[in-house]
Amino acid sequence: MNYEYYKIFYYVGKHKNITRAAADLFSSQPAVTRAIQNLEAELGCRLFVRTKNGVEFTHDGGKLFEYISAAHSQIVKGEEEISRSNSVENGTVYIAATVTALRCYLFDILDDFHLNKFPKVKFKINTGSTNNCINQLKSGIADLAFVSTPYSNTKELNVSVIKQFNDVLIGGSKFEELKDKVLPLEELRSYPVVGLRSHMQLRQFIDSYLSEKGLSVTPDIEVDSADLLVPMIRHNFGLGFVPYDMARKAIEKGEVFKIGIDRELPARQICIISDPHHPHTNASRELYRTVLNK
């Protein structure tokens, strides 16, 4: 196995351009092209196809890049960790988190951890869906994942519940007739609804709960981030279910209001997840310990 070929493959895949990859590698375009051709010969498949602007992955190339990208991330983390002092103070923590986990829990924890305990610790945070965050953890891109339930695909991972929270139904000024009233869930279909995309965990949680009650409500407007729910509802695009902690400030300011429903939703949890098969930096280990001891 020629590891140099995979390094070159990574940079070509990163830039989708052989010339830019060669510049990053302080190499020549012909040398990069030869390396890719040699790797394709070793693997017995095409990895790239040429386009007007550079190259694009083949199906096999895209699959390979997922693994090489994760390996490259681990190498960079290793280099960064070794190049610094091995102390917590100078470390970096790679975090994958859902927007809900960030807004309802993680910001406060990081504020205390960073400002009051380890001000030199650096954080690199990727946001995504619950499943995406778990996959980042499994692939070694993240040291820790902070997600909201429900979740799946956590076999062989360490999962700890760190907070319980509730989702509430809210509306804007256009729907003031619902203020101080209790709305039967069956009547929700009479109003426009703002919700997350169907693959996202909060949407699946709401859909599952309503289905158990013999109800089905399809959002009129779908967004791909929980951060967009309150602004859309505040601008009267519809009613929507939102974690209370994310809506609290807007409720207190009178920008939106909570709508009572005849059957409250079950509580959900925020969890911290770690992978025992991946090594922890001192900084990530300390953050993990801090969270569990709260």
Image (cartoon, helix red, strand yellow):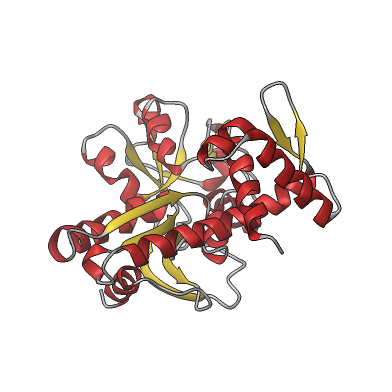
Task: Residue 57 in the image: state x and y as whole percent.
Answer: 73, 40
102 up-or-down from 18: above or below: below
Q: Residue 262: in sight, yes or no?
A: yes
Q: Quadrant of residue 108?
A: bottom left
Q: Quadrant of the N terminus?
A: bottom right
The residue that appears at 57% across and 63% down in the rendered structure is 139
Q: Quadrant of the C terminus?
A: bottom left
The residue that appears at 36% across and 67% down in the rendered structure is 82
Q: Residue 268: in sight, yes or no?
A: no
Task: Residue 41 in the image: state x and y as whole percent.
Answer: 83, 51
The residue that appears at 46% across and 72% down in the rendered structure is 274
The residue that appears at 30% across and 68% down in the rendered structure is 283
Instruction: Say whether residue 90 is left or right of residue 156.
Output: left
Instruction: Say whether residue 101 is left or right of residue 10.
Output: left
Q: Quadrant of residue 154?
A: bottom right
Q: Nearer the viewer, residue 130 or 6?
A: 6
Instruction: Say whether residue 69 is left or right of residue 239.
Output: right
Q: Quadrant of residue 160?
A: bottom left
Q: Nearer the viewer, residue 182 or 170?
A: 170
Identity of the residue furthest to the top in this view? 52
164 up-or-down from 43: above or below: below
Task: Residue 185 in the image: state x and y as whole percent.
Answer: 53, 47
34 up-or-down from 74: above or below: above
Task: Residue 83 in the image: state x and y as whole percent.
Answer: 33, 63
Identity of the residue furthest to the right in this view? 44
